[in-house]
Image (spheres, rainbow, N blue to C red):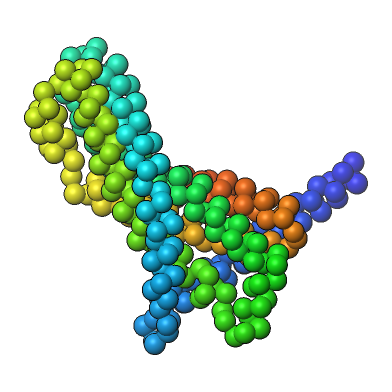
Amino acid sequence: MQQSVENLVVFAGKKTLSFLNIVKEISKLINEVFYWTFISPMIGGKIRFKSIFSEMVKVGYNSILIVSVISFFVGIILALQSAYQLKKVGALIYIANLVGVSLTRELGPIITAIIVAGRSGSSFAAEIGSMKAAEEIDALKSMGINPVSYLVSPKMIAMLIMVPCLTILSDFIGILGGFVLAITAVNIHPFSYIQQTLNALMVKDVITGLVKAISFGGIITIVGTYHGFQVSGGAEEVGRRTTSSVVSSIFMVIVFDLFFTALFYYFT
């Protein structure tokens, strides 16, 4: 019995130390990213515009099609499910309210973040992980180049710009999907649907979604690059860290979405 208790205490201690070490590494990375992304340019640091634009194309432009298609289908699904319930009380016109508010406040940012985490977050982890495995990160350090400044800062800036843009696109396309379903299958007049959507949406709904989108972009970048820098083996380790980055990013996005939703609920 005593041996079992000792084993349990040792196990708990190891897990706690491991968790604290992860928190330490992530905090260190966040501190460096914040400095090289926001502070350094203000005190004369070089801004690598070419790398930023390249990352913006990868993160934003290359994601437009998949974000649009999925958002359109989600808008249709949301309108269908709403119609199923609202039909019972003769309030089909409120499909517009539900679709518009749900997409701008919750589903638009979440859908965009999950897609970007799967595409770009995993790409960040794989790119940096491969460089770490090939000792290219050490080569950068030996040349006096900070890896965070060179690799992470352009990605962070691109994510902070493009994820909100993709979120706005997702909101619009999703609402369009609900609109198409409503005027075809439910026979709601187009003008009435548009007017109801405009009446339902408020500026704070859009702002709420954009605040979430910005935070999600930062989270995905930090998580993806963290896992990349933690690679310590070969190709197998790169693959494992890439998978972990996607799972961790989605988990953190959901957690922060809950936090912001509760925050806006109680203070707006």
Camera-nearest residue between 123 and 44: 123
Q: Which residue is drawn at 56% across and 48% down?
A: 246
Q: Which residue is drawn at 52% across and 54% down?
A: 121
Q: Where is residue 131 in the image (x, y as percent from the top left)?
A: 64, 66
Establish if 14 lies above or below 86. Answer: below
Taking the view exactly as shown, the residue that stands out farthest to the bottom is 44
Q: Which residue is drawn at 39% across and 81% down?
A: 41
Q: Quadrant of the N terminus?
A: top right
Q: Where is residue 17 in the image (x, y as percent from the top left)?
A: 72, 60
Establish if 171 lies above or below 17. Answer: above
Q: Residue at x 62, y 48 (%)?
A: 243
- In the image: residue 15, left or right of residue 100: right
Residue 210 visible to the viewer: yes
Q: Position of residue 242 (x, y in %)?
A: 62, 52
Camera-nearest residue between 257 and 194: 194
Establish if 104 lies above or below 59. Answer: above
Residue 252 visible to the viewer: no
